[in-house]
Image (cartoon, rainbow, N blue to C red):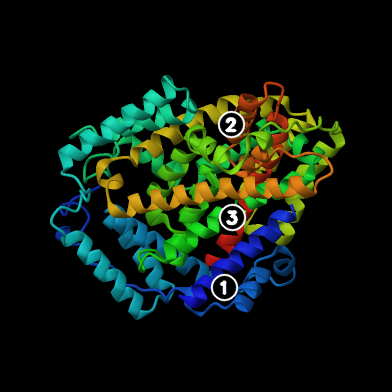
Amino acid sequence: MHKTKKIVWLIALASMLASGLASAGPGCGDSACGVPAPQFETEEPAEQGISISGGFSKLWKQTGIYRFIHPKTVQEKKAEKLNAAIKTVEAKICAGEFREAEIYAGIANNLGADRDTRRRLRDTYTAKVNEGDPTYEGLLPEGLGQFVMILVGLGLIYLAVAKKFEPLLLLPIGFGAILANIPAAGIASVGIPGQPAGFLYYFYTVGVQSGVFPLLIFLGVGAMTDFGPLLANPKTALLGAAAQFGIFIAMLGALSMGGLFTLQDAASIGIIGGADGPTAIFLSSRLSPNLLGAIAVAAYSYMALVPIIQPPIMRLLTTQAERSIEMKQLRHVTKTEKIVFPLMVLVLCILFLPSATPLIGMLMLGNLMKESCVVDRLSDTAQNAMINIVTIMLGLAVGSKLAAEKFLNVQTLGILALGLGAFVIGTASGILLAKLMNRFSKDPINPLIGSAGVSAVPMAARVANKVGLEENPNNFLLMHAMGPNVAGVIGSAVAAGVLLALCG
C-alpha cells in the first residue's frame, strides 16, 4: 500500500506538469448451457512493484518522443493485447455476458496468460454463474428497487424541466432510468438465445462501452469552444490544473477502502472529480470496464448538478468582498492565435502524452474546424446535429445504468460517494488557488472563477458568473471564468492520459 500511495502522488505530480505544458440468468450462455468456465489468467497487478523512479521511467517510455525513437516491440504489443483481453473478460463476467467472456478467455489464453490469474478468473466466473439470482444484485428487493429508481428518474426529469438544471443531460438520463426499470420489459437487458437485447443495451454497448460517444462529444465541444479567454489570460490555465487535484485525492480514497478497488479502478473513479463525463467514460472503458456503468452515471450526475453542488462551496471559501471583485476586460485575441493554438496543443500532446491524443485530438479538430472558417458546414454539423444526436443516445445509455440491480449496490454507491468527494475537492482547490493568485497578481482576480476549473463546460463558468452577479450586479465573470473552464477540459484529458499511461 505504501508503494501504491507513492505512485498515486507520482501520477498527480506528472499530471500537473503535463497540464502546465499545455443481464442473463443461468439458462443462457453460462456453464448450465454446456459452456466451460474460462481457462485463463493474467499477471498480478502491476502497481505492486512500481516505485516513483519506475513510474517516471514508465511515463517517459509512453511519450511520443521516446516512441518515435523506440517503437513498441512485439512483446510489448502482445502484453497490451493480453491486458486488454483480461479486462474485457472481467467486464463480461460482471455483466453476465458469459459467451462473450469465453471468446476473450480464449484470446487471452492464446496470448500466454498465466495459471494463477486463470484460476482467479475461473473462480469469479463460477461464483457468478452459480449464484442464486445472477440477474439481480440490488440492496432492495427487485420490485421495490425498480419502483424507487423510477422515482429517481422522475426526480431527474423534474430538475431538468422545473429547475432547468442541465436539461440536455438530465432529461434523457432520467427518462432512460425509467425505461430501464420497467418490470419485464427488458429495455436495457442483455439478450437471451433467440431474442435480441433491449435497445438501450445496444446504445450503451455501441456508443459508451466502445468509447465512440465520448470522442464525438469532444469533437462537438471543440467546435463550440472559444479558447480566446484562455489565450487572453494564460495564467488561468493554472486554475484548470488545480481543479484536477480532487482526482488524485479520490484515488487515494478508493485505494484505502480495504482492497475493494484496484489501482486501475481507483484511477477510473478519481477522474469523476474532473466533472467530465466523456473523459470518465473514455478512461474507465480502458482501465476498468467492469465499473464503466457506475462511473458514467456518477460523472454525468455531478456534471448536471453543478448548479447545486458548487455555490455552497464557493460561498463557504470566499468572502463577500472577494466575490464582488471586478476583473479587467480581456484583451483581443487574433484569428492567427486561435488557429495556431489547437495545432500547438496537438503537437505537444503527440510529443509528451500520446495516450491523451484521442480526446485532445478530437477536441482540437473540432476547434480548428470552427476557427479556420473554411469548413463551416462541418463545424455546424459538429456543433448542432451530430452532438445533439449523440447527446440523446448517450443520455439514454447512461440512464440505462440506473437500473435497480446496477445502481442500488454497495460498490456503485461507494463510487458515487468518492466521485462527489473528488468533485468537491476539485472545486475547492480551484477557488483556493485563485485566492492565492489574487494576493500576488497585479490585476485583481475574483476567486469564483477558480471553481470553473472543473471541466463541466460551460456550466461551471455560468455558475461562477451567476454567483458573482448576486454579490455585484456589475460583476460579469463569464468570459473570465471560461478561461479556467476550457483549461479544465484540457487538464482532465491530460490527467486521463497520464493515468492511462501509468496504470494501463
Q: Gap between marks 1 and 2, in whole Å?
A: 46 Å
Residue drawn 35% across the image and 66% down it: 105
Q: Element at badge 1?
A: helix
Does 347 appear above or below 340?
below
Residue drawn 41% across the image and 26% down it: 159
Q: Earlier in the sequence, mark 2 or mark 3?
A: 3
- Pointer 3 residue: 245
Q: Element at badge 3?
A: helix
Q: Which residue type does callout 3 highlight?
A: Phe
Give the label, 1 or 2, closer to the camera: 2
Q: Earlier in the sequence, mark 1 or mark 2?
A: 1
The numbered disc on residue 76 is 1
Quarter location, residue 477: top right
Residue drawn 37% across the image and 36% down it: 399
Q: Position of residue 372 (x, y in %)?
A: 79, 32
Quarter location, residue 350: bottom right
As rendered, which of 226 and 378 lies closer to the eye?
Answer: 226
As rendered, which of 300 and 371 lies closer to the eye?
Answer: 300
- Pointer 2 residue: 463
Judge from the rendering whether residue 215 lies leftward or rightward of residue 32; answer left or right: right
Quarter of the image with the N terminus in it: bottom left
User: Mark 2–mark 3 contact, CB under 8 Å?
Assistant: no
